[in-house]
Amino acid sequence: MFLLLPFDSLVVNLLGISITVLFTLLLVFIIVPAIFGVSFGIRKVYMKTLLKIFQWATLRIERGAKEKNHPLYKPYVNGIIAKEPTSLEEEIKEIRRSGSGKALDTPEFELSDIFYFCRKGIETIMDDEVTKRFSAEELESWNLLSRTNYNFQYISLRLTVLWGLGVLIRYCFLLPLRIALAFTGISLLVTGTTVVGYLPNGRCKEFLSKHVHLMCYRICVRALTAIITYHDRENRPRNGGICVANHTSPIDVIILASDGYYAMVGQIHGGLMGVIQRAMVKACPHVWFERSEVKDRHLVARRLTEHVQDKSKLPILIFPEGTCINNTSVMMFKKGSFEIGATVYPVAIKYDPQFGDAFWNSSKYGMVTYLLRMMTSWAIVCSVWYLPPMTRQPEEDAVQFANRVKSAIARQGGLVDLLWDGGLKREKVKDTFKEEQQKLYSKMIVGNHEDRSRS
């Protein structure tokens, strides 16, 4: 029989004590408060401490760069090209005035008009409104992460030591802690929903299902050290409605579900995600689709309509953009969710990139890499606004209703309201967009000609 040496016994005992203490701290300060939905305020103190460190680091960089005459802030604001909002007609008028000197009311085609479209095309290639929405935001202060420091190139010995200390804290302390919490939350979600699923339908099952979901999502929120501020909770989505929100990250679901009880909509997956989906649907009427069903718009609309018509069922959570945007803008909402005729509950989500960039660039990072980046950030800080419910007006079509909801979300979240489809990051521009510009130019020429004929 193998006998442990005294030193080995000491190491094993210390390791066992450390694991016991860690698990006790997790249970007392994180898991139990998550179960009851309370907080000791530790995360807010942590956030304020980080802010002071970031401010000091930024001031140190600015002072050091000034002493050595290093350029600090590069001339980058919202884009490479300064643009002012003008119409096609106004710009062509200016080109004609500076070129041929002819007035705009001349009905004939002018060769100089080509320069307007050439210039617009080149500007779009160099600095379009779509591509920049799929890259990380630049920060106004350095957050000791080497991910978004475009403006912070000056590094001193003191800052390097501070950055190295931050790496040790994030990877050697925060990462293991967050992985343990995430594993706990997911395990409890699968186990709890499976057990609740065997109960007969009724108020008891609904009550337990709601609290199991909330408890597990709150634990997962703490696994990201998420600090969330919820506003106007009296407007939270109610049964029989549809909750729509701007989309920045897969964790948007966790952010919202830790404060409310929703029916999820999505495609059926395999692997671990499939296990979670099958367990969740036993306890709650989520709406999952097979891969072949997702492409059938009519089938999807019918399933969603049947769900919202039952006022006893949970509100559906949908992200109409269909892809993740970098939290600076809101892009085109798909109209399918707005054709159903249900009450829509808009929600605006705005992340603070100082502590960690929540945006998921799915074209650049896989899910595992993205989650690793999230769990090695300092924290995830965001604000959530519940807007008053909105219904489709008699004179509105689905597209107009979707645009009205999108504008309300953008206005509340301080985001740029864009008409572009987020799918353009992977697809070509639709012919309809090109035809709109052609129609505007044609209307300008033909319209003016018709006006001259009448006069």
Image (tube, rainbow, N blue to C red):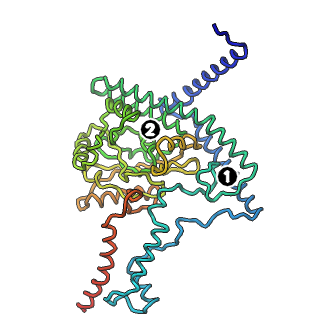
Answer left or right for 23 relative to 83.
Answer: right
Query: Eyeballing the image, is 124 above or below 398?
Result: below
Answer left or right for 134 relative to 432.
Answer: right
Q: Which mark is residue 258?
A: 2
The amino acid type of the residue labelled 1 equals Gln
Answer left or right for 189 relative to 335.
Answer: right
Place residue 334 in its image quadrant. Answer: bottom left
Q: Quadrant of the C terminus?
A: bottom left
Residue picked out by circle 1 = 55
**Visible in this render: residue 72?**
yes
Q: Quadrant of the N terminus?
A: top right
Q: Please tell me which residue lies in front, 361 or 22.
A: 361
The amino acid type of the residue labelled 2 equals Ser
Residue at 33 percent across and 30 percent down: it is 283
Judged from the image, the secondary structure of the residue bearing numbered disc 2 is loop
Query: Eyeballing the image, is 198 above or below 406?
Result: above
Mark 2 vs 1, N-terminal side:
1
Q: Please tell me which residue lies in front, 197 or 346.
A: 197
Real-space Cα distance between discs 2 and 1? Answer: 31 Å
Measured as percent of width and height from the top left, residue 196 is found at 35, 25
